Image (cartoon, rainbow, N blue to C red):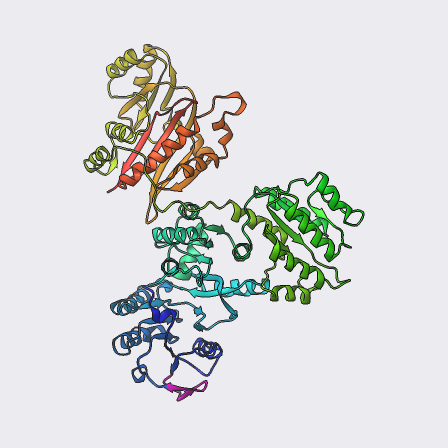
Amino acid sequence: MITKELIDPRSIVVIGGSNNIYKPGGKVLKNLIDGNFKGELYVTNPKEDLVQGIKCFRSPDELPDVDLAIIAIAAKFIPATVELLTQFKNTKAFIILSAGFNEMNNSEGKICEDKIVDSINKVNGSLIGPNCIGVLTPKYNGVFTLPIPKLDPKGCCLISGSGATACFILEAGIPKGLTFSDVFSVGNSAQLGVEEILKYMDESYDSKSSPDSYLLYIENIDKPQMLLKHASSLIRKGCKIAAVKSGSSEAGSRAASSHTGALASPDVAVEALFQKAGIVRCSSREELITASAIFAHKKLNGKNIAVITHAGGPAVMLTDALSKGGLNVPDIEGAEAGKLLEKLYPGSTVGNPIDFLATGTAEQLGIIIDFIDNKFDEIDGIVVIFGTPGLVRIFDVYEVLDEKMKTAKKPIFPVLPSTLTAKEEVDEFLSKGRINFPDEVMLGNMLAKVYNTPVPNPEKIQLPDIDKKKIRAIIDNASNGYLSPDGIHGLLDATGIGRTKEIVAKTKDEALNFAKQEGFPLVMKVMGPVHKSDIGGVVLNIKNEKTVEKEFNRLMKIKDTYAVLMYPMLFGTEVFIGSKREEKFGHLVICGLGGIFVEILKDVSTSLAPLTKDEAHKMVKNLKGYKIIQGARNQDPVNEDLFAEAIIRVSALVTVAPEIFEMDLNPLIGTKDSLNAVDARIRIEK
């Protein structure tokens, strides 16, 4: 839990404080002093009587009661120190800067860390760290690092699993004009991780005083459901969240583990969680900073962007980036465009990008912005690119830009690339509370990412009407392993997923009887082997009894085959729906083109159960093969509504029956009128 003593302490002690400000204990004490901490400030050091002008206690047992302890001593001494402070000094909050714990990947470090957590939990206290840079809030500068930004309650809240990364984000964000409200470096997350900090921010959120923007750097998601719940809740309240989840590759996962002592989470599950929560996923510090800068501007409510520039090259690169991200830079034409062109110098163009030349003036910039804001309703947002080769000063241009950003109805994103040549002008612009996007391509890429990130799901998702009682009866009576065909049929029927009539034939006579009853053409598949097509275990378009007999005899000789699955041959497009239980995250629901295309093309969409109708439709539309589902080249389409409905029903099934470890409906045969499963596997793990 996060205690008041961590957020707003009345007293702080630096255990291991020093006069040497180049050591963590010395630097954090200096930062606390320089930040004018308003409460009582104490320090302990066995060798000093006075540290940085503050009376020093030789031992923690000499201290008075203290709310928050910031600890910077060797790891082996910390468990006993924490025990003393919790039991005898009424300390309820701890920030442990020291390393040497679980990140060392040895039992000694883990045991030491667990002892500390146990002592703090006994008093319902809070722990940040160990192995972190600390905490930075409007109440105190509890970090041993630089830079320390001027804190703004409505700036962005930075929560990072890596202390160094937090520093580098601050280093890059501050010069662009980005402001921060709080910085939490959670280190090993022994007790409090990114998820718990975000939970606190959600539960204590106040629209008047809390930050509306959150930046996360995460190396492991240990509590995905907590993250999903509270990120979604904050975003539904009007907040914005962007996050880097590192360790997405195998090598990155190993690096994350060695750094924090935590295993990286499966990337496909992370991607699904972020999409469901409405978190903008970033891949670098610069993307994270740019997303936060976009958050600080008016919301972009449509895809159409006007680019205003006096330099052609950057406008072209920006246009490319916007277009690749699915945003538009549409032509601007008509009578109003002609009127605008008349107000600019000869040689200017207004087709979009609007290029008013290197000789363009501040007055002309203001005219262009007014025209776009008031005359061109099809435009949703504006990017202004304006730098200088150093021949003239451009204070007046940036003054006009600032004024128009105050009054324009549409968002205006400034790209001011001359951060050296026009440093004074840019600095003055930033001093007015503005933020700069010095790289137009990064802005274009992230503007598209932010715009295309979905809104979070409703807090409660209505499941479709399925027979829960029948589903539970089948699952409760099933053993671990693959369900029998009868069990699969029962679950599909109870869930409302269409299927073909089929038989698992163990004898030739059973196969022939089924053929006589159902007619032709038929499909025959081996039961037992996994990759049926690879071993010749699938026979299509069987048209007579002689072929049934011949193929049954052949199929039964294939290794591991115990029976032959038979069903009527359906014609249509093969699609796929599956699900897999991912530890801690819940069930991933997957859809794509079916048959062999699932493994060869790997064209799938993934989300976390349970799903809404909108989510299911979006999954279908996000497939690269979506045009095949629509009916490319005069082929019959797949009924999208039926496809999406089946996806929702699979998500409902695994929600009601979490014991389902994995499930494949491959293929389902889709036409414009029907969707039926013709093969299915379901594995149970209780």
The structure residue drawn at horizontal position 63% and vertical position 57%, both measured from the top left corner, is: 438
Where the C terminus falls, by quadrant? top left
- Which quarter of the picture shows residue 606? top left
Q: From the top left corner, tell me how far across and down residue 384 is, in percent.
A: 66, 53
Give yes or no for residue 48 being in the magenta stretch.
yes
Q: Is residue 493 above or below residue 250?
A: above
Q: From the top left corner, tell me how far across and down residue 536 is, in percent.
A: 38, 24
The structure residue drawn at horizontal position 75% and vertical position 56%, both measured from the top left corner, is: 361
Toward the right, the furthest residue is 346
Toward the bottom, the furthest residue is 49
Of 280 and 463, the residue lying toward us: 463
Residue 418 visible at all: no
- Which quarter of the picture shows residue 101? bottom left
Where the N terminus falls, by quadrant? bottom left
Of 147 and 540, the residue lying toward us: 147
Q: Is residue 205 above or below residue 519?
A: below
What residue span does the magenta drawing correspond to?
Answer: 45-56
Give yes or no for residue 561 being in the magenta stretch.
no
Of 356 and 656, the residue lying toward us: 356
Q: From the top left corner, tell me how far across and down residue 109 is, in percent.
A: 33, 66
Q: Is residue 505 above or below residue 129?
A: above
Q: On the picture, is 325 further left or further right than 471?
A: right
The structure residue drawn at horizontal position 34% and vertical position 51%, both measured from the top left corner, is: 225
Q: From the top left corner, tell me how far across and down residue 30 is, in percent.
A: 47, 79
Of 345 and 678, the residue lying toward us: 345
Residue 60 visible at all: yes
Q: On the picture, is 309 further left or further right than 510?
A: right
